[in-house]
Image (tube, helix red, strand yellow):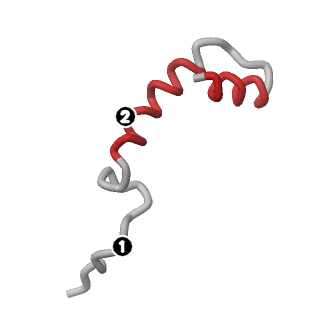
Amino acid sequence: MNFWPKDFWPPQSPDLNPLDYSIWWQVEKKACQVRHSNIEALKSSVNQQ
């Protein structure tokens, strides 16, 4: 049998950093409340959050 080594972490593992998954939807919700005219406006909105 082939097993993953103990130091191998899949890139989208919920065990990797649970905080990432609980915060991103809040950032997206607040940043996307208004329509942004360009990428710089979107970045600015995300950074303000």
Label 1 crowd (10 A; few <14 / some 14-19 / many >=20): few
Q: Secondary structure at mark 1?
A: loop
* Residue 12 percent across, percent down from the top left: 41, 55
Above or below: residue 37 compared with residue 39:
above
Q: Residue at x 37, y 41 (%)?
A: 19
Q: Residue at x 37, y 66 (%)?
A: 9
* Residue 7 percent across, percent down from the top left: 34, 74
Label 2 crowd (10 A; few <14 / some 14-19 / many >=20): few
Q: Amino acid at mark 1?
A: Phe
* Residue 3 percent across, percent down from the top left: 25, 81
Q: Amino acid at mark 2?
A: Ser
Q: Is residue 14 left or right of residue 45?
A: left
Q: Which mark is residue 33?
A: none
Q: What residue is shown with label 2?
A: 22
Q: Is residue 30 left or right of residue 12?
A: right
Q: In terms of image quadrants, where is residue 33?
A: top right
Q: In terms of image quadrants, where is residue 40?
A: top right
Q: What residue is shown with label 1?
A: 8
Q: Is residue 28 left or right of residue 20?
A: right
Above or below: residue 27 compared with residue 13:
above
**The furthest residue to the top:** 34
